[in-house]
Image: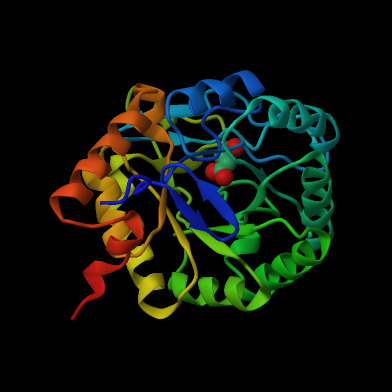
């Protein structure tokens, strides 16, 4: 095994290990990003930011589900103008790549936010075209190959930073959306965002979340996420960042074998911030046991016929 077996260069980013903080988990502050980087993440992804500040939904915004959580925060964010100052500050402090997640209500919106985030110093842009419950953005864009393609094309013109497209699983065939993103110029895909879900209280006999519906994340969605990664890797050569229910090294390795080169960890971080270190250590042991020189050696191995 090579001494830097865990480091990975992918879609214009170099990480010292193949883990990233998933978008949405630690919000918008440099202090949180720094905590995550110090606990061993190879990169951090911010919560999604739009052009204007947005308050988000009324509480409750998160509910525990079996083997996961359902959230509907409503994309609360300070707007890109204010957040640009935090990006600049983060870049002075962070020693790992900072990926800025963005959303908009039109291709022009996405392009403007991407431009400002890039000028502020984002190392890459992740397009949130997959939030399952905010109207006129997110999955409402990412479920349409035509709209998705327009957004990706406009953002490509607005920034020369690596462009990662985070896909929705709430579609009939995710490979059609992957193809649209790839043909429009995506450098990498994050696979997947949350599954649209609901929780109901039997005493009050009403939906629990303020927004009624939200997005399910955590262990419950891992098999779906893995299948989406597998399907996309089966058809396309694009770098894939696996995301969905990863909580230990074994989960991470399953995603590499399915075709991902990097994994994002979200829900599991809320329980245990040390998860990055334990996953990285476990991947390292696995590579050694399998005589693999690096993560790249095992990416996509499950596709061998
Ligand atoms: C939210 O802010 O409600 C979640 C965003 C997302 O699922 O993309």
Q: Is residue 92 left or right of residue 59?
A: right
Q: Write down the quadrant of residue 84 in the picture.
A: top right
Question: Residue lying furthest front in this view?
Answer: 3
Q: Residue 235 in the image: x percent, y percent? A: 40, 80
Q: Quadrant of ligand 1?
A: top right
Seen at 30% across and 67% down, the residue is 300
Which quarter of the rendered picture does the C terminus lie within? bottom left
Q: Is residue 51 left or right of residue 289?
A: right
Label count reads 0
Q: Residue 22 in the image: x percent, y percent? A: 49, 40
Depth check: 46 or 280 in front?
280
Seen at 60% across and 28% down, the residue is 27
State whether residue 154 is above or below residue 263.
Answer: below
**According to the image, what is the colour scheme of the structure?**
rainbow
State whether residue 155 is above or below residue 133.
Answer: below
Question: Residue lying furthest left in this view?
Answer: 289
State whether residue 279 is above or below residue 62.
Answer: below
Q: Residue 217 in the image: x percent, y percent? A: 39, 41
Seen at 74% across and 32% down, the residue is 87
Could one spot residue 239 in this view of the protein? yes
State whether residue 160 is above or below residue 181.
Answer: above
Depth check: 222 or 212 in front?
222
Seen at 39% across and 36% down, the residue is 199
Could one spot residue 77 in this view of the protein? no
Q: Write down the quadrant of residue 79 in the picture.
A: top right
Q: Write down the quadrant of residue 141 in the picture.
A: bottom right
Q: Residue 276 in the image: x percent, y percent? A: 37, 32
Depth check: 135 or 11 in front?
11
Q: Is residue 85 left or right of residue 130?
A: right
């Amino acid at each position: 095994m090579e001494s830097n077996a865990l480091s990975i260069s992918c879609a214009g980013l170099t990480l010292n290990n193949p883990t990233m903080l998933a978008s949405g988990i630690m919000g918008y502050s440099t202090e949180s990003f720094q905590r995550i980087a110090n606990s061993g993440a190879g990169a951090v992804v911010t919560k999604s930011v739009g052009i204007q500040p947005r308050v988000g939904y009324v509480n409750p915004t998160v509910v525990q589900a079996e083997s996961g959580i359902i959230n509907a925060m409503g994309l609360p964010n300070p707007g890109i103008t204010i957040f640009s100052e935090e990006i600049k500050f983060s870049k002075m402090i962070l020693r790992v790549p900072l990926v800025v997640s963005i959303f908009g209500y039109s291709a022009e919106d996405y392009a403007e936010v991407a431009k400002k985030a890039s000028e502020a110093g984002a190392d890459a842009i992740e397009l949130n075209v997959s939030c399952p419950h905010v109207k006129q953005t997110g999955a409402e864009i990412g479920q349409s190959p035509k709209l998705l393609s327009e957004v990706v094309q406009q953002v490509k013109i607005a920034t020369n930073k690596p462009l990662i497209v985070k896909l929705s699983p709430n579609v009939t065939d995710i490979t059609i959306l992957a193809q649209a993103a790839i043909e429009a110029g995506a450098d990498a895909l994050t696979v997947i965002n949350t599954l649209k879900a609901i929780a109901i209280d039997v005493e009050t006999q009403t939906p629990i979340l303020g927004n009624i519906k939200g997005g399910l994340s955590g262990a419950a969605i891992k098999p779906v996420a893995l299948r989406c990664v597998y399907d996309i890797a089966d058809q396309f050569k694009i770098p894939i960042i696996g995301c969905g229910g990863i909580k230990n090294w074994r989960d991470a390795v399953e995603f590499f074998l399915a075709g991902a080169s990097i994994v994002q960890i979200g829900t599991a971080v809320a329980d245990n911030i040390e998860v990055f270190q334990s996953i990285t250590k476990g991947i390292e042991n696995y590579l050694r046991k399998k005589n693999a020189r690096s993560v790249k050696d095992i990416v996509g191995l499950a596709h061998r016929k």
